[in-house]
Image: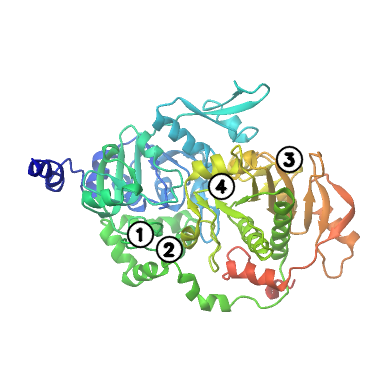
Amino acid sequence: MIDIFDELLFEGESKGGSSKVMSLSEAVSRYIKPGMVIHTGQTNIRWCTAIIYEIARQFWGRKPNFTLVGISMNFPQSILVHGGLVRRIITSYCGDPYYTPSPNRVYQRAFKEGVLEIENWSIYTLPLRLKAAALGLPFLPTFSLIGSGMAEENDEDFLIVDDPFQTGKKVGLVNSLQPDITIIHGWMADREGNAIFLPPLAENLYGAMASKEGVVLTVEKLVPMETIRKYSQFTRLPGHYVRSVSEVPFGAHPSGLSRVGMEDMDLYMEDYDFVEEAHQASKSPETFENWVKKWVLSCKGHSDYLRKLGYKRILELKGRSHFDSWRFDIGVMENRPKTTRYTPIEMAIVAMARKLAEKVKKNGYQTLLAGAGIANLAAWLSFYNLKKEGYSLDLMAEVGLYGYIPRPTDPSLFNMRNFPTCKMNADIHTIMGMLVGGKKAQCIGALGAAQVDERGNINTTKTASDRYIVGSGGANDVASTAREVVAIVPHVKERLPKKVFYVTSPGKTVRTVVSTLGIFEKLDTDSRFTLTAYYPKDGLNKEQIIQELCEGSNWSFKVASEVEEVSPPARWELDFLRSFDPRRYYLGSPPDEQGT
């Protein structure tokens, strides 16, 4: 009897079953059809690059009129837009992440020319729509988006209704979103498509489980089913959702793989230089066309692509994926400016870090979530400032990081070296839905902005009907649900308008704005800002600096009766700050070159 069980249950698994293994070329040819709504899934692994490249090869020169759905549209998806393969995008962020978060010119050109429609959501509400579809529900509730331009633009898929359980309260409802098919890259899978994805899980696998036609899956490694059983706690996608599975090592490049909870896998770091090369190429249609020909269209398949990358580059990315690799980036650390002179942006970041620490201690905030860019440098500096004083604060990042410790040498918010330092690795639903805005959450937000108006409304979406920036990302969710927000912005008139063109994030919780000249705060119940502090400036007295502050913005703001002069950055503050960004991707030219 035991022999029969062995034969039926375990030997049968190794002999056959419903294998979905096929080449990537065959999978795309068989399952990707013109007119499809294609969901590009994102978990710990940012991009399913190899699949996107193969779609480009097979559909180049045609007009398949794809709609792309994804929490983040970056340079891989921009290849499809550049080739005229995409007519519409549904996303929360449309730009490039490295070296710095910035607009992508391919999307901007297509949007300006009217050949691309961009439907804007936040990084929490878009996955919420996919989750509703996966659950078979018509909608799910949220407090995000209310009062934003996204609420107005998406009125067919977002409703503001009376809370049926609390008199006088309003709640938003997001319509479910069911893509036609999902494309995604995972860690490993068996021949049936049961697939492992490691945390942090970002949007999680709800979009994959919602898709009408299932999932086209690539993985680093095909493994026996007993391996899937061994790591079943990491299996996030059951095989019956999967249409095809293809073994494509390095299939996420230039994204990477970071080890969180599993030892027996080859890893590789994100290739920032490659992303930057593509970002620079995107500034010109001709240059980007040549870049696409070189890296995508001239390659017969993924193997050609890897040969073009070269052994040395692949080996270096594997080496840099080690948890402690930052310790060996000695040369770049030694190149940090040693001077106590500082730039206006360094002064603003230090001032923001101090202000965040002050508010955390005063109001008892337990967590801090920062947006990408200089805001997260201020958050990191504030974290170490509080740590020096023995105060506990947990840093969070929207893709699922909780309680992480920022490492030196890499200023990227989602830098993979920080993943293993987390107290908990979760997903967007947990971080943005519960730990930022949940019933017991005590979270303060730190946000950057393209524009902030005199009521604290933040714009990161568009400055004119045909001028796109990048979108919300998680900014709207933080501004909508965190207890309080501190924003940072350069002090120039176009960045400080009286009223923003587009409200990405409503200003109700934005209580403080730190600029490169001073600090503005909403005092008591005031809905407008008061200048409460300024930075010292050689050759200018207090009145002259305040005059410069007034002339550099379009705001109508009050001036406090006693405006504080902020003390210059301490040496240790500059050392910490510069260690986060030694290549000065975010910090810009060093102080000696700016004459500050």
Q: Amino acid at mark 2?
A: Asp
Disc 1 packing (10 Å; few <14; some 14–19; many ≥20)? some
Mark 4 vs 1: CB contact within 8 A:
no
For marks 4 and 3, the one nearer the N-term is 4
For marks 3 and 2, the one nearer the N-term is 2
Residue 499 numbered mark, or none: 3
- Give the left or right position of residue 197, taking residue 526 as reference: left
Q: Amino acid at mark 1?
A: Trp
Q: Is residue 163 above or below residue 483?
A: above
Find residue 569 and report its horizontal and vertical position in percent: 74, 68
Inter-mark Cα distance, 4 to 1: 25 Å
For marks 2 and 1, the one nearer the N-term is 2
Find residue 129 and report its horizontal and vertical position in percent: 47, 33
Inter-mark Cα distance, 2 to 4: 21 Å
For marks 4 and 1, the one nearer the N-term is 1
Residue 470 numbered mark, or none: 4
For marks 1 and 3, the one nearer the N-term is 1
Mark 4 vs 3: CB contact within 8 A:
no
Q: Which residue is rendered at x = 74% and y = 49% of the image?
A: 512
Q: Amino acid at mark 4?
A: Val
Mark 2 vs 4: CB contact within 8 A:
no
Disc 4 packing (10 Å; few <14; some 14–19; many ≥20)? many
**Dot 1 lies on which element?**
helix
